Amino acid sequence: GPRDIPDAALAGGVIVKWNAASGQNVRLEEPPADRAAFDAAFEAWAARPYGQDSGEWSYALAERRIIVESLLPETPGASLLDLQFYCCNGEVLFGWITGGEKRPPTAYGIFEPDGTQRPVEAIVPVLRPGRSWMPAGSRPPAVWPRAVAIARRLSQGIDFVRVDFMLAAGELYDPAANTWTTTAPNDPNAWEA
């Protein structure tokens, strides 16, 4: 649990997060001002498996661990980009870019593996407040071909996988794989609706 994390690991310049949740993290520029409150927040998150209300049931199956990672380098005035590649057995079907998810405003874009932007407003016309689509004619970042190539390699032999990266200061970080596409209702009757 959180009390097992040595104080030295929380000296600052890190993000502390659960491996089996989304949004259950604390960004530490400096050591926590109140270590007891910090530990209590993680213990409260641990008291109930994440995702049971949002359809992300598979998080409950993971052995929960707390991860302490160095903060990614940031370029002043630029947000981190989240690159997600939806893949089937070594083929990238499309890529999804999220800019500003960690620090709004948030903008989304969907791109072909060759970097061509897909028109998406007809697919998902309504976004939550404070979020928007990237303007028509947007291009993915220069590392796009390299990210596509890595996603192809990582997805070989897997029927479906989403391969994710963070892009910070022009470099790719944290390749991760996720075998579900999105969330779904927990109630089987909801599938009939």
Image (cartoon, rainbow, N blue to C red):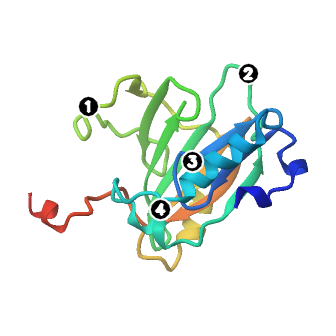
Q: Is residue 171 above or below residue 59?
A: above
Quarter of the image where the C terminus is located: bottom left
Asked whether disc 2 touches disc 3, contact meaning CB atoms under 8 Å apart, the reply is: no
Given this view, does label 3 or label 1 mark the residue nearer the observer? 3
The residue lying furthest to the front in this view is 36
Q: Is residue 141 above or below residue 153?
A: above
Quarter assignment of residue 183: bottom left
Percent x, y of residue 25: 62, 45
Percent x, y of residue 156: 53, 75
Which residue, given by chain and number where applicable, does mark 1 sit on?
126
Mark positioned earlier in the residue sequence (3 or 1)? 3
Q: Indicate left or right for 107 with 70 as reference.
A: left
Tag shown at residue 76: 2
Q: CA distance from mark 4 to mark 3?
A: 11 Å
Q: CA distance from mark 3 to mark 1?
A: 26 Å
Asked whether disc 4 touches disc 3, contact meaning CB atoms under 8 Å apart, the reply is: no
Viewer-proximal residue, 153 or 20?
Answer: 20
Quarter assignment of residue 2: bottom right
